[in-house]
Amino acid sequence: MSTDMQLNIATTATDLMQAEIIKDVLETAGVSATLRGGLQDAYPGTSGLGAIDVLVADDDLALARDVLTRASDAGLDFDLDEEE
């Protein structure tokens, strides 16, 4: 993902494992994603602690939310916390 793109929060995960699953779902659908947040940002070496934002390019935001909604509807176990 290019660093000059505007990134937006597609959803927020409750922990690192959930964030990685969401990121994988998005990338499988062709949407580049990156993760930000959680205690691992403040305390390197920790993992799975704190809320983590799943970021996508502004142009991919609607598609990302659609992909995540469809994945959730299909039974993937994560709650979507959509930012407006």
Image: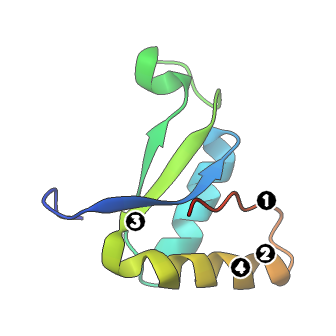
Q: CA distance from mark 3 to mark 1?
A: 18 Å
Query: For this view, does 45 lie left or right of residue 50?
Result: left
Would you say residue 28 is visible in this rendering? no
**Crowd around label 1: few <14 · some 14–19 · many ≥20 (10 Å):** some
State if disc 2 and disc 1 touch (CB < 8 Å).
Answer: yes
Q: Which mark is residue 79?
A: 1
Q: CA distance from mark 1 to mark 2?
A: 8 Å
Q: Amino acid at mark 1?
A: Asp
Residue 58 lies, in percent from the top left, at: 34, 72
Furthest residue toward front: 84
Q: Residue at x 78, y 60 (%)?
A: 78
Q: CA distance from mark 2 to mark 4?
A: 5 Å
SS of the residue under disc 2: helix
**Crowd around label 3: few <14 · some 14–19 · many ≥20 (10 Å):** many
Instruction: Identify the mark nearer the N-term, 2 or 3.
Output: 3
Q: Amino acid at mark 3?
A: Val
Query: For this view, does 27 lie left or right of residue 78?
Result: left
Instruction: Identify the mark nearer the N-term, 1 or 4.
Output: 4
Q: Quadrant of the C terminus?
A: bottom right
Q: CA distance from mark 4 to mark 3?
A: 15 Å
Q: Residue at x 55, y 30 (%)?
A: 38
Residue 25 lies, in percent from the top left, at: 58, 72
User: Which residue position holds label 2?
Assistant: 72
**Crowd around label 2: few <14 · some 14–19 · many ≥20 (10 Å):** some
**Crowd around label 4: few <14 · some 14–19 · many ≥20 (10 Å):** some
Would you say residue 63 is visible in this rendering? yes
Residue in the foreground of this view, choosing between 30 and 11: 11
Q: Amino acid at mark 4?
A: Thr
User: Which residue position holds label 3?
Assistant: 56
Residue 43 lies, in percent from the top left, at: 46, 14
User: Which residue position holds label 4?
Assistant: 69
Q: CA distance from mark 2 to mark 3?
A: 18 Å
